[in-house]
Image (spheres, rainbow, N blue to C red):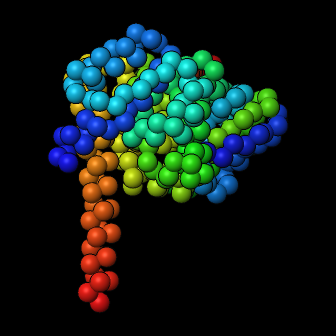
Amino acid sequence: MKKLHVRKGKEIIKEGEESGSAYVIEAGTVEVSKTNAHGKKRVLAVLEEKAFFGELGLIDRLPRSATVTALEDCVIGEITQEMFDTLSKTNPKALLPFLRIIAARLRATIKILDEYKHQPGPSQQ
Amino acid sequence: MPQNERCLNSKILIVDDERTQVLMLERALTKEGYKNIRSTTDPREVHGICKEFHPDLILLDIMMPHLNGHQVMEQIKDLQEGNDIGPDTIQILVLTARTDPETAFLSYLGGAKDYLEKPFTIPVVLLRIRNILEAIHLQNELRDLKIENQRLRESKG
């Protein structure tokens, strides 16, 4: 796996950009954020060592859904589309843990949505 | 040589920093009839052992001091890509106490053929080992038959 040495503050992936590779944090921490229509940034998560990000791009190749920024100097492993496709063909068993990673991410997203839903709206405040 | 005998003659290397785990696997493999078993509790020795012993299969732990299992797999990949021991000649079965999907996926990406979480039962680990070894020998047989087939075609033509 190719290793990327990323400086603190650098954006590793940018929301809206074309996706390709996924990444795994080997050292350091990163911040996952989204910017709303008014340009206001919302931090969705802070990820640490061994966490994956950008994994959806390996499946749907759609534009990135969030921006990921290094919060400190990081070492990041890159999982390219080619590596993923080869692994899927040669050892499909590998897809099961990958699906578990996606499922965990989906559950975390549902939890955020639930919390958001239960927040009082403007008329109730 | 019959398939069963070929499997039992395969070279197996056990890599785990826990001595009790190594002894348990050695005992189970010996009882099953495996004849070529080596082991180490120091992952830094794997590189040298691979160059000399040329294992068919490595039973590899992940969480170890000095070098973790992922780093060991990188070393093995380098050895195979550098033609020190030939490409794809070593298969890896990861045996680890880690249960997170990230570790499992990284293990497969690093070249593991299979992955088993600890604690495992002896019959299960023996079955996984057997499956990998049978696949290796069948692939080798297929390769040899293809070469023989090609040779016969060329001699006729």
- Position of residue A81 measured from the top left corner of the image (x, y, whole percent): 55, 55
Q: Nearer the viewer, residue B145 or B127?
A: B145
Figure check: A47 above or below B150? above
Q: Is residue B138 left or right of residue A81?
A: left
Q: Is residue B52 left or right of residue A78?
A: left
Q: How many marks?
A: 0
Name the image quarter holding residue B8.
top left
Q: Nearer the viewer, residue A90 or A116?
A: A90
- Position of residue A65 measured from the top left corner of the image (x, y, whole percent): 61, 46
Figure check: A116 above or below B56? above
Figure check: B153 above or below B1? below
Q: Is residue A43 left or right of residue A71?
A: left
Q: Nearer the viewer, residue A115 or B144?
A: B144
Figure check: A103 above or below B27? below
Instruction: Work out which quarter of the rendered image holds the N terminus of chain A and state it.
Output: top right
- Seen as rendered, the residue at the extreme top is B20
Instruction: Work out which quarter of the rendered image holds the C terminus of chain A and state it.
Output: top right
**Can residue A64 be seen?**
yes
Residue at 40% x, 9% y is B20
Residue at 27% x, 57% y is B141
- Position of residue A84 measured from the top left corner of the image (x, y, whole percent): 50, 51
Residue at 51% x, 37% y is B52
- Seen as rendered, the residue at the extreme bottom is B157
**Can residue A63 be seen?**
no
- Position of residue A51 measured from the top left corner of the image (x, y, whole percent): 58, 31
Residue at 47% x, 55% y is A85
